[in-house]
Amino acid sequence: MSENNSVEKRILASLKSKFGDSILEDGEEGALGPNRIRTFTSREKIVEVAQAIKELGFDQVISQGGTDYPKEDIFKVNYHLIAVDDEELKPIILSLATKLPRNDPKMSTLTTVWRSAEFHEQETFENFGIFFEGHPRMERLLLPEDWDDIPPLRKDFTLPGR
């Protein structure tokens, strides 16, 4: 985040003032480069934080996905958000992330905040086995209907025959 970018600072300050310690540290929070903001919260607070981010003007999920960290025994879920109609926010991509334990990979859906999260969450469910509670269609989308192996993007997945 550049020294002169008061918009980025204002967004982070607004979230910190509203949620305090619920906006958690995750590496170098806030500073990803020009027009990039990273926020991190618990799965228990993610819907509230997402709603506040939407109220700030970020109205579209452009991508979302998971990452498997088996050594830490967690999954990380990350949403990338933009503001379609707000000229001041338009160049900014805001990242909202949370961590989930591998033995309990579930969280509330953010489709209640952004309808555009639907396909992304469905794909993350299918590829990582992360369940999004309240999602309108937690079902297979890309994998064969008879898939009976672990989700293919988990690090412990091995290709058949290997």
Image (tube, rainbow, N blue to C red):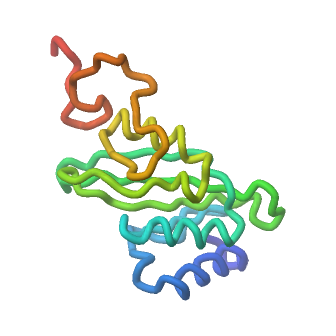
Q: Nearer the viewer, residue 140 or 3?
A: 140
Residue 3 in picture, x, y percent from top left: 66, 78
Residue at figure coordinates x 22%, y 22% from the top left: 148
| Image quadrant where one finds the C terminus | top left
> Total of numbered circles in the picture?
0
Q: Nearer the viewer, residue 27 or 121?
A: 121
Give the side of residue 83 with respect to residue 97, left or right: right
Give the vertical position of 156 relative to 106 (above or below): above
Residue at figure coordinates x 61%, y 69% from the top left: 53
Q: Nearer the viewer, residue 139 or 16?
A: 139
Residue 2 in picture, x, y percent from top left: 65, 72
The image quarter containing residue 46 is bottom left
Residue 153 in picture, x, y percent from top left: 32, 34
| Image quadrant where one finds the N terminus | bottom right
Residue 120 in picture, x, y percent from top left: 51, 41
The image quarter containing residue 107 is bottom left
Give the side of residue 22 with respect to residue 154, left or right: right
Q: Nearer the viewer, residue 84 or 68?
A: 84
Residue at figure coordinates x 27%, y 51% from the top left: 105
Give the side of residue 52 with respect to residue 79, left or right: right
Give the vertical position of 162 relative to 107 (above or below): above
Give the vertical position of 145 relative to 105 (above or below): above
Residue at figure coordinates x 64%, y 76% from the top left: 11
